[in-house]
């Protein structure tokens, strides 16, 4: 099948083939034996397997579907295979890359994954790939649809219907059993885990709270629908019912508590409507909420944690300040943090902590940008170390007092000309993607050749795997061998002077070459 030949799905045939997952040599015997019925309360003690793109998922509820297992991996990258062991309440999920699997495990180590409100356990498998026979057509169709949407490849006729529905970036959301109020801010923070939320309109129809929510890309809308349809925002209530809208673009006139255009912060509030404070609904997050939020938190922070962003108890979630830890203190600078975090928002100030130089505070323009940067950069590798990104309890980053030398550890970037999101309605709002091995280059001078750019990016310490100019040669895609190399190249080469006062623009791409 064109465009999806790398997807293989199915179940193992015969006890001899299944035994590979239980053999003493596989390193999984104690996992399978200890969790054979999924009902034990203790985590089996097994030696952790090294990172692998195949993940072992345990203690799944017996009624869990393949789609729900796939949804666990979708926010982190392409899912290429799945094997479910129904009798053992277990599954194996194969991600497209090891980096995607590492990001997924790092995140779920911090926030417990739930399937049907039941906590499940995820760890690396000893297997480097899944070899399965393509027998399960229903699962195969789901994976092929997801693969086709994610890669924009040529879909087969089996998934045309799925893709036709998924061609809109706009979702229609109905909240059933709305025991507690649900605000526009809560929806934004839940759904933005799956991509950039551009616009939201909320309204009441037939005595039901409804919303229209527009992503920057239809594939993000598809991922959000797969993962969130049928989930509860708060424990046992506020159930999300999600469908694709026939609309492909929302027209938002006012920014207030009923509607919001995140690409146009200059819009008026209209009718004197106040903007709702995200902390208003704090009283309603007493119990576990969607996908396992932490307590006690305001509704906004609960939603943020639910959407895959780590928030600690006591934090309000409305701060635009991030705490970044486990940095390489020999290499990191305020400038390098400004460049990397600037991909997801306009960084105002950076402070590397004087007494703990592997940690830094980063002040973004607002809480939405902080959430976006946290969801994309937590668990990524920077200068060889996996960084941790959480919300800080600080509301602002303080500058050193006049005359006090802090060795250049604090820098104010408020007036930087390099902010990507200053201009309302900028195209940059539509081109925010997770870190990837492929980089998008723009503002390339006419006399710069492919060889020039390959050499430039090789000198940043990485290996260039592929390169492609766009038709006008002002833009190009360049693929490094790993996501870490691409992150390094972006830090080193974004805004690089290419001569004639033309500065190279570098960002992460959703495409591959």
Image (cartoon, grey):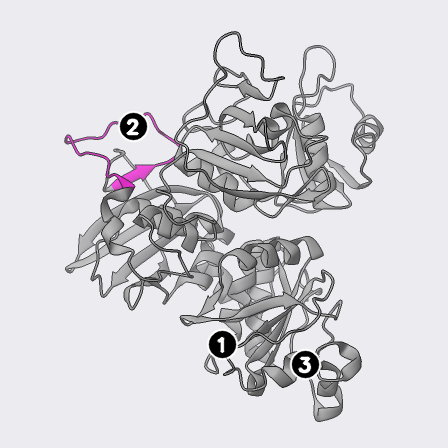
Q: Which residue is mark 3?
A: 30
**Residue extending furthest toward the front:** 355
- The residues tagged by marks 1 and 2 sit, at their Cα atoms, a distance apart of 43 Å
Residue 226 in the image: x percent, y percent?
A: 46, 63
Residue 305 in the image: x percent, y percent?
A: 42, 52
Q: Residues within 10 Å of mark 3 (few under 14, many from 20)?
A: some
**Residue displayed at 39% across by 64% down:** 229
Q: Using the image, determine if residue 148 lies above or below residue 37.
A: above
- The residues tagged by marks 3 and 2 sit, at their Cα atoms, a distance apart of 59 Å
Based on the picture, tell me whether residue 287 belongs to the magenta stretch: no
> Which is closer to the viewer, label 3 or label 2?
3
What is the secondary structure assignment of the residue under circle 3? helix
Instruction: Judge by depth and name the residue closer to the eye, 16 or 48.
Output: 48
**Residue displayed at 20% across by 62% down:** 179
Instruction: Judge by depth and name the residue closer to the eye, 468 or 130.
Output: 130
What is the secondary structure assignment of the residue under circle 2? loop
Based on the picture, tell me whether residue 270 belongs to the magenta stretch: yes
For the N terminus, which image quadrant?
A: bottom right
Left of 158 or right of it: where is 426? left
Does label 3 or label 2 sit earlier along the sequence?
Answer: 3
Q: Using the image, determine if residue 451 lies above or below residue 307.
A: above
For the C terminus, which image quadrant?
A: top right
Q: Which mark is residue 267?
A: 2
Q: Which residue is mark 1?
A: 65
| Image: magenta residue range | 259-278
> Which is closer to the viewer, label 1 or label 2?
1
Residue 434 in the image: x percent, y percent?
A: 58, 44
Does label 3 or label 1 sit earlier along the sequence?
Answer: 3
Q: Which mark is residue 360?
A: none
């Amino acid at each position: 099948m064109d465009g999806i030949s790398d997807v293989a799905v199915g179940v193992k045939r015969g006890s001899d083939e299944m035994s590979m997952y239980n053999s003493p040599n596989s390193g999984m015997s104690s996992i399978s034996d200890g969790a054979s019925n999924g009902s034990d309360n203790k985590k089996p003690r097994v030696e952790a397997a090294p990172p692998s793109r195949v993940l072992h998922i345990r203690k799944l509820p017996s009624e869990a579907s393949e789609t729900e297992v796939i949804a666990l991996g979708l926010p982190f990258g392409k899912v290429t295979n799945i094997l479910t062991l129904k009798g053992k309440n277990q599954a194996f999920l194969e991600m497209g890359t090891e980096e995607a699997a590492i990001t997924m495990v790092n995140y779920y180590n911090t926030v417990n994954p739930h399937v049907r409100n039941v906590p499940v356990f995820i760890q690396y498998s000893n297997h480097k790939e899944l070899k399965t026979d393509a027998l399960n057509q229903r699962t195969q169709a789901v994976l092929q649809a997801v693969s086709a949407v994610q890669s924009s490849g040529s879909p087969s006729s089996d998934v045309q219907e799925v893709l036709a529905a998924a061609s809109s970036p706009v979702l229609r959301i109905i909240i059933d059993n709305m025991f507690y109020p649900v605000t526009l801010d809560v929806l934004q923070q839940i759904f933005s885990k799956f991509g950039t939320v551009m616009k939201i309109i909320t309204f009441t129809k037939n005595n039901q709270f409804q919303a229209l929510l527009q992503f920057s890309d239809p594939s993000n809308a598809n991922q959000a629908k797969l993962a969130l349809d049928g989930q509860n925002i708060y424990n046992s209530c506020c159930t999300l019912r999600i469908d694709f809208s026939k609309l492909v673009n929302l027209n938002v006139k006012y920014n207030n508590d009923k509607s919001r255009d995140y690409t146009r912060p200059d819009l008026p509030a209209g009718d004197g409507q106040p903007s709702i404070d995200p902390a208003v609904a704090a009283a309603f997050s007493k119990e576990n909420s969607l996908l396992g939020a932490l307590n006690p938190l305001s509704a906004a922070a609960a939603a943020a944690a639910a959407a895959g962003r780590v928030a600690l108890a006591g934090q309000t979630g409305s701060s635009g300040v991030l705490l970044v830890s486990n940095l390489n203190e020999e290499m990191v600078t305020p400038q390098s943090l400004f460049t990397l975090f600037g991909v997801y928002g306009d960084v105002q100030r950076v402070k590397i902590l004087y007494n703990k130089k592997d940690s830094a505070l980063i002040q973004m323009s607002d809480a939405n940008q902080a959430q976006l940067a946290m969801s994309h950069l937590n668990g990524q590798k920077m200068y060889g170390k996996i960084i941790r990104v959480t919300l800080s309890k600080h509301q602002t980053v303080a500058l050193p007092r006049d005359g006090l030398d802090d060795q250049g550890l604090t820098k104010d970037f408020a007036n930087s000309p390099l902010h990507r999101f200053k201009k309302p309605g900028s195209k940059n709002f539509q081109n925010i993607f997770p870190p990837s091995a492929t980089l998008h280059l723009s503002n390339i001078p006419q006399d710069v050749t492919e060889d020039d750019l390959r050499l430039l990016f090789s000198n940043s310490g990485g290996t260039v795997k592929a390169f492609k100019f766009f038709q006008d040669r002002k833009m190009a895609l360049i693929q490094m061998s790993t996501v870490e190399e691409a992150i390094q190249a972006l830090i080193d080469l974004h805004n690089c002077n290419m001569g004639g006062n033309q500065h190279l623009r570098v960002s992460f791409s959703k495409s591959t070459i």
